[in-house]
Image (cartoon, rainbow, N blue to C red):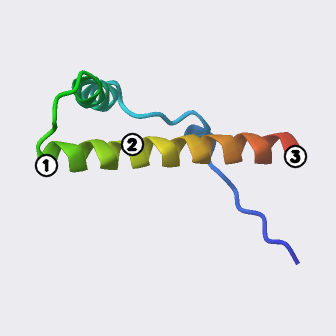
C-alpha cells in the first residue's frame, strides 16, 4: 500500500526570502570575482546553496504530486 503525503499549497511556492537570496548572491559574486571567502562565509554560502537546492527539490516534487493528483 502506498501512503500519500499531503503537501501544503504554501510550500509549493516557497522560496528563499529576498534578503537571504541577496546574501547568497553577494557571497557567490565575491567568490566568482576570485575573492577567497573566509571559512565562515564559505560555510554560510554552502549552507544557503543546500537550502536553495532543498527548496527547489521540494517545489518540483510538489508540482509533480499536484499534477498526478
Name the residue at 60% across, 46% down. Answer: 57
Name the residue at 44% across, 41% down. Answer: 52
In the foreground, 8 or 42:
42
Quadrant of the frame with the N terminus: bottom right
Task: Using the image, tell me which numbered label, if any, was put on residue 40.
Answer: 1
Task: Using the image, tell me which numbered label, if any, was put on residue 58.
Answer: none
* Marks 1 and 3, the one that precedes in the sequence: 1
Task: Give above or below for 3 relative to 7.
Answer: below
Percent from the top left, x then y, of residue 35? 17, 29
Gap between marks 2 and 3 measured at Cα: 29 Å
Task: Give above or below for 12 relative to 28.
Answer: below
In the foreground, 14 or 10:
14
Gap between marks 1 and 2 measured at Cα: 14 Å
Task: Give above or below for 68 relative to 22.
Answer: below
Which of label 2 and label 3 is nearer to you?
2
Q: Which residue is mark 3?
A: 68
Percent from the top left, x then y, of residue 65? 78, 48
Amino acid at each position: 500500500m502506498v501512503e500519500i503525503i499531503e503537501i501544503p499549497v504554501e510550500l509549493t511556492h516557497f522560496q528563499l526570502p529576498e534578503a537571504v537570496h541577496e546574501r547568497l548572491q553577494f557571497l557567490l559574486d565575491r567568490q566568482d570575482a576570485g575573492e577567497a571567502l573566509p571559512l565562515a562565509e564559505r560555510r554560510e554560502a554552502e549552507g544557503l546553496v543546500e537550502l536553495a537546492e532543498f527548496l527547489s527539490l521540494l517545489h518540483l516534487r510538489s508540482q509533480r504530486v499536484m499534477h498526478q493528483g
